[in-house]
Image (cartoon, rainbow, N blue to C red):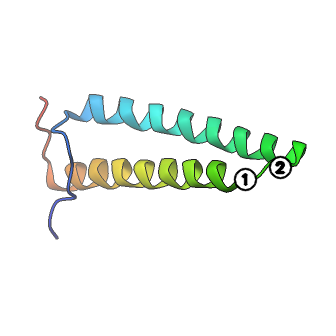
Amino acid sequence: MPAPVSSRRWGLPALEAAIVTAELRLSEHLAHLAWCQAVGRNTTIAQSLLLSAELRLEGLWRERDWRLVHGRDAGN
């Protein structure tokens, strides 16, 4: 299985910090989507931001898992 494509070469601790940050962003986007729905605003942009955050988080987790399985940590 090839390595996931990454735009950066992070060490595992930095990658895990990026995952935490992406999870926080995802929570913010979920809250924004809920607010848009509650006040009757169009949710198209909020849904797009949410999808983008989900995809980013998925990619970060995939890269972390790949590194752990293959024993590769470029940062350490």
Which of the two residues, 28 or 12, is positioned nearer the viewer here?
Answer: 28
| 4 to the left or right of 52 | left
The Cα atoms of the two marked residues, 2 and 1, are separated by 7 Å
| Residue located at (76% from left, 52% from top) | 42
| Residue located at (44% from left, 55% from top) | 55
Q: Which residue type carries mark 2?
A: Gln
Q: Earlier in the sequence, mark 2 or mark 1?
A: 2
Q: Measured from the top left, where is residue 20 in percent x and y?
A: 46, 33
| Residue located at (54% from left, 56% from top) | 51
User: Would you call the spot at circle 1 few (<14 residues within 10 Å), some (14-19), or many (20 or more)?
Assistant: some
Q: Where the C terminus falls, by quadrant? A: top left
| 27 to the left or right of 18 | right
Q: Which residue type carries mark 1?
A: Thr
Residue 10: image tag: none
Q: Where the N terminus falls, by quadrant? A: bottom left
Q: Secondary structure at mark 2?
A: helix
- Going by the picture, which residue comes out furthest to the front? 42
Q: Measured from the top left, where is residue 73 in percent x and y?
A: 14, 39
Q: Measured from the top left, where is residue 17 in percent x and y?
A: 37, 29
Residue 62 against residue 22 in the figure, above or below: below
Q: Badges 2 and 1: C-beta atoms under 8 Å apart?
A: yes
User: Would you call the spot at circle 2 few (<14 residues within 10 Å), some (14-19), or many (20 or more)?
Assistant: few
| 7 to the left or right of 43 | left
Which of the two residues, 63 or 48, is positioned nearer the viewer here?
Answer: 48
User: Disc 1 marks which residue?
Assistant: 43
| Residue located at (62% from left, 50% from top) | 45
Residue 37: image tag: 2
Tell me which corner region of the image, top left, top right, bottom left or bottom right, holds residue 12.
Answer: top left
Q: Secondary structure at mark 1?
A: loop
Residue 75 against residue 6 in the figure, above or below: above
Q: Measured from the top left, where is residue 62 in percent x and y?
A: 33, 55
| 72 to the left or right of 65 | left
